[in-house]
Image (spheres, grey):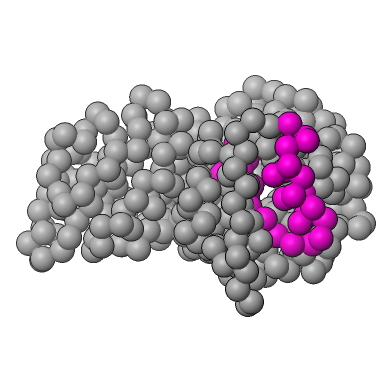
């Protein structure tokens, strides 16, 4: 891949006439890829109608070609160009949660580039709740296909610096709109079945969805080992820090015991914990990612903390586990993937 000088467009105060946004939108229209903030994580965007533009996303990230992309829109009219059917429950969800961290999987329409959906007959669409993302999509005047703006396998980026660390030299530019607000990706909901099914837990919880449309199913692969996930991306290793991560399901003293036995083997050890416990442990590096009584704070800081561990040259990291209530479901899904499924039970 040819080296490109990656531009940084800092956006502090958003309006459509902001020259940085206009420049970034111009590159989208020229079928180049650029990174931009959303309320969940930073996205790596390209014109969803151009196969050539979308191919550059897969190349820059090193993303497997069978992993489809989510298409981002700024106005409801753009949905008509992307899908050929909107079931009633999808319309209800759109009214309740858009703009917001909910991706709806619907039957795909014509026109959309084939590599966006990795050849599937469905497409994932969402309207992000971030003024910079909305302004960029409006100004580009095309739907923007965008996965998270990290190198495949690494934790998703929640700041422009994370994107720069991963993709400098590989993309034309990054719109820097500051740190993102939710911290974990959108919930992916398959709306093609009679009972909508969560394929990936995320920023909108099952409880929130059920309040609006009643019964919502969950892909059995999210709950049981050995099942193939219905969302192609979920079979890949993801979110992993450089050091081996283990989830520890047990007491503070049980986790501390794991640290002691790793230290006896000469290992450099990190602990991922919360403000409630970070003074209780002893280890080489102890990082807190929020408070157990506010799981949205854990979601917000999770990827940043996973990336931070990479600065210390650790051998192993032990992480506490979290309640799966609300956004805790998404937090545990990402941590379990980051650990490659390795949990130590007390
Ligand atoms: P990312 O944008 O990197 O957060 O990844 C998007 C996630 O949405 C991946 O897990 C994809 O497999 C999933 N996804 C996107 N489109 C579809 C679709 N049409 N059907 C099922 N899963 C999808
Ligand atoms: Mg991703």
Can residue 64 be seen here? no
Left or right of residue 255: residue 33: right
Say above or below: 324 vs 106.
Answer: above
Q: Viewer-proximal residue, 54 or 103?
A: 54
- Residue positioned 23% across, 52% down in the render: 270
Can residue 81 be seen here? yes
- Residue positioned 40% across, 26% down in the render: 294
Q: Viewer-proximal residue, 26 or 93?
A: 26
Say above or below: 252 vs 152.
Answer: above
Q: Viewer-proximal residue, 29 or 325?
A: 29
Q: Position of residue 275 (x, y in %)?
A: 27, 31
Q: Viewer-proximal residue, 12 or 210?
A: 12
Write the start and end of the magenta stretch as one range: 15-41
Q: Is residue 27 magenta?
A: yes
Left or right of residue 206: residue 197: right
Q: Which quadrant of the view contains residue 266?
A: bottom left
Q: Position of residue 233 (x, y in %)?
A: 60, 59
- Residue positioned 35% across, 63% down in the render: 242
């Amino acid at each position: 891949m040819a080296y490109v000088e990656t531009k940084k467009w800092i956006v502090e105060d958003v309006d459509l006439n902001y020259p940085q946004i206009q420049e970034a939108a111009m590159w989208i229209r020229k079928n180049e890829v650029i990174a931009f903030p959303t309320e969940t994580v930073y996205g790596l965007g390209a014109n969803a109608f151009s196969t050539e533009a979308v191919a550059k996303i897969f190349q820059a990230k090193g993303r497997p070609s069978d992993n489809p992309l989510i298409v981002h829109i700024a106005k409801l009219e753009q949905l008509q160009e992307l899908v050929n059917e909107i079931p009633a429950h999808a319309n209800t969800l759109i009214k309740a949660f858009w703009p917001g961290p909910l991706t709806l999987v619907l039957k795909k329409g014509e026109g959309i580039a084939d590599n966006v959906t990795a050849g599937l007959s469905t497409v994932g669409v969402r309207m992000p709740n971030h003024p910079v993302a909305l302004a960029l999509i409006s100004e580009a005047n095309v739907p923007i296909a965008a996965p998270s703006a990290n190198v495949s396998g690494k934790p998703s980026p929640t700041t422009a610096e994370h994107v720069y660390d991963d993709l400098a030299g590989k993309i034309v530019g990054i719109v820097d709109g500051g740190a993102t607000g939710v911290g974990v990706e959108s919930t992916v909901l398959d709306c093609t079945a009679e009972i909508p099914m969560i394929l990936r837990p995320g920023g909108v919880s099952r409880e929130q969805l059920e309040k609006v449309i009643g019964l919502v199913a969950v892909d059995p692969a999210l709950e049981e080992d050995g099942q193939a996930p219905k969302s192609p991306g979920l079979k890949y290793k993801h979110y992993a820090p450089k050091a081996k991560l283990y989830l520890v399901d047990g007491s503070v003293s049980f986790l501390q015991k794991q640290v002691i036995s790793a230290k006896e083997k000469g290992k450099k050890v990190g602990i991922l914990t919360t403000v409630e416990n970070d003074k209780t442990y002893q280890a080489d590096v102890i990082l807190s990612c929020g408070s157990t009584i506010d799981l949205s704070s854990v979601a917000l800081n999770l990827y940043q903390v996973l990336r931070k561990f990479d600065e210390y040259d650790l051998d192993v990291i032990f992480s506490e586990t979290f309640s799966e209530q609300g956004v805790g479901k998404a937090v545990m899904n990402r941590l379990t993937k980051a650990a490659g499924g390795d949990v130590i039970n007390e």
